[in-house]
Amino acid sequence: MPKTHKLRILKDKIDFNFVREEVEKKYNVKMGRAAEDPVRMFKYLFLKCLYGMSDRGLIERCMSDMAFKYFLDLAPEDPVIDPSLLSVFRRQRLADSNLLDFLITKSVALAVDLGVIKSRTLIVDATHTCSTYNPFAPVEILQLRSRKLRASIYDNTKEPDTYRKMFPEKPSGKNLEAEMAYSRELISIIREKKIMSDIPIVVENVNLLEETIEDIEDHFTTSVKDNDARVGHKSEDSFFGYKTEIMTTPELIITAANITTGEKADGKELRTLVQKSKNNLGATEEDKKVDDVLGDGAYGGDNNLKLAKEEKFTLYARPNPMLYKSNENKDDGFELNKDAGMYTCPAGHLAVGKSIIRYKKKGKGNDRLQFRFDPDKCECCKLKDKCLKQGSKTRYYSIPIKTPEQEEQMKFCKTPEFRERIKERFKVEQVNAILKNVYGYRKTLSYGIYSMKIQGAMTIFAYNLMRILKLTRKNG
């Protein structure tokens, strides 16, 4: 193994034994046969992420690649694990651990020890990861679930026509309200008449159909496989998946991250990200000091401006006029999606239109920006009784334009200092591009928010280590 090979450098510089301390509570040394070394299992996952390989492809390469075997502390003749063990390790040994924060903390500590982080500036942005599984329109998934439920009943009887006569008439077309009413009636009949209540597959399909109705009321769009993924928006386009808010230094070392479902608004987790970054950067107050935070328009809201004053750092973020609410609307659940330029309601639905309400008489207050929501989504939403006024079919939401806080921040944006410092914000876009194009963060590898967090943790850890390696080589 040449001394310049990156796997040899990583093996020599990094002690991976911290993994054993994190997962040892998941093992029992007194029961069963000896388990595979958790440090080596973690290294397998690290290689998988670093080289963008499938479980099976990774194990096949480990059989013949001596660099991989050296990194894994295996002799050339030593056998490798079965690919199925990687899935077991991910889902059982890493469960219940906050792997994302844990690995970021370890990698940032290494960067601090090696002296590659010199700046006291943090840059924040959000990036999205699309689900591997396609979203279904609400009507489509309801029809699929109800069809599977009926089929499970017909498959367990010799007289399916008897049950067909009991069930309500299937609606024609793609009317969501009619399909939901049909599904509810179908569930009600099956439960009231106790149809095959002792057959597990029937009970499971009834529960799945009921959960699907609740999911549609909750977030309108869902998937057969990935129940955690949600629809989010980038500009006018939507995506189905997850969102990661990333905080990085100008040296492009990720200091904190937060992974959520796709519909969450940007800018709400700045306090958490700043606090995590400060804790990761060092133990003393001097080490934790942050001078500046750079972000886009999503991070220029009132709460973040107050945070900047509390924590004594300068926030460089161009304010979006739509971020500023009046006091009566502060905690109403409506959030700005800065990419789409629209508000989302408490149920996560994006507004479909907006207009300006202008007052001819100045005494009535500031002009307002009004948003209109899709009446079809409002009609089947579980929050409609609280959200819609009696007799109304469409929800409108308005905010004032040009508040005093906004005016103050807008003036700051015009200063030479702001214009010069905000130029550095593009660096976080570089990080996002590398994560997606080099480390495969554009798409999920599995389904569910848990798997997404594991993927995010390993991806960011691999990225940080390779970035640290590059910086140490550059610095000599």
Image (cartoon, grey):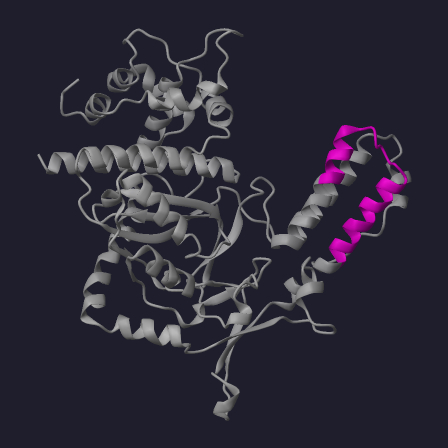
Q: Position of residue 290 (x, y in %)?
A: 26, 51
Residue 15 vertical position relative to residue 376 in the rendered view, above or below: above
Question: Left of 49 or right of it: where is 261?
Answer: right
Question: Left of 272 or right of it: where is 420?
Answer: left
* Residue furthest to the bottom: 361
Quadrant of the rendered structure where residue 397 is?
bottom right
Residue 151 vertical position relative to residue 262 in the rendered view, above or below: above
Question: Left of 279 or right of it: where is 322?
Answer: right
Q: Which span of residues is magenta-colored?
A: 178-207
Residue 383 located within the stretch drawn in magenta? no
Quadrant of the rendered structure where residue 389 is?
bottom right
Residue shown at 33% from the left, 61% from the top: 309
Give the tally of numbered discs.
0
Q: In this orientation, does residue 352 appear?
A: no
Q: Position of residue 272 (x, y in %)?
A: 40, 48
Residue 189 located within the stretch drawn in magenta? yes
Q: What type of secondary structure mainly makes up the magenta span?
A: helix
- The residue closer to the viewer here, 467 or 193, is 467
Residue shown at 29% from the left, 34% from the top: 107
Residue 465 vertical position relative to residue 436 in the rendered view, above or below: above
* Residue furthest to the left: 476
Residue 133 vertical position relative to residue 25 in the rendered view, above or below: below
Q: Position of residue 390 (x, y in %)?
A: 73, 72
Quadrant of the rendered structure where residue 10 is?
top left
- The residue closer to the viewer here, 403 or 235, is 403
